[in-house]
Amino acid sequence: MKLKEIKEILNAKVLTGEEYLDREVLSAFGSDLMSDVLAFIDDGSVLLTGLTNPQVIRTAEMIDLHAIVFVRGKKPSKEIIEMAKLHNITILLTDYTLYTACGKLYEKGLKGISVEGVIK
């Protein structure tokens, strides 16, 4: 699934990285715990989170993650947006809750990541 499809499904606003909306995403992972993100997610995934601090961008940079969806209408600071631009990370913003956003993507065929790290 391409990021532009995710944008449409989640009725999301692009905060940065609009030029990368043709990137392919293989799976999604929803979490506010960056330790879980580091343990289970890979670079073909999109992260959905309500956490809007610099640690999210640092975590994404460490695992070469190219897209983050901030849920519940939580808008990141200008610092976070600038960090994302610096690392070519697409940031999307949706008003859906984490549960609903993940469910909508799953319903449209985007698989999740299990705790074993296997796409399901």
Image (tube, rainbow, N blue to C red):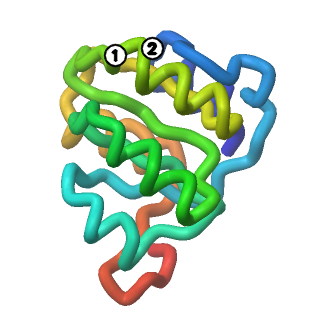
Instruction: From the image, tell me which residue sits under label 2.
Output: 11
Q: CA distance from mark 2 to mark 1?
A: 21 Å
Q: What residue is shown at x 65% (from left), y 50% (from top)? A: 25
Asked which secondary structure carries label 1, the reply is loop
Residue 106: x, y in percent? 42, 50
Pick the quarter of the image with the C terminus: bottom left
For disc 2, the neighbor class at 10 Å (few under 14, some 14 to 19, many from 20) is some
Whole-percent x, y for residue 117 in the image: 44, 83
- Give me the disc on residue 55: none
- Return the residue found at the far bottom: 116
**Decide: marks 2, 1 in contact (CB < 8 A)?**
no
Badge 2 amino acid? Asn
Q: Which residue is mark 1?
A: 77
- Residue lying at 19% horizontally and 30% vertically, measured from the top left: 97
Asked if residue 53 lies left or right of residue 90, the reply is left
Residue 7, how many percent across, how many down?
A: 55, 22
Q: Residue at x 80, y 32 (%)?
A: 22
Q: Residues within 10 Å of mark 1 (few under 14, many from 20)?
A: few
Corner quadrant of residue 4: top right
Q: Which residue is at a point 35% across and 38% down the rendered structure image?
A: 54
As helix, strand or loop, the secondary structure at mark 2 comes to: loop
Vertical position of residue 71 compared to residue 13: above or below:
below
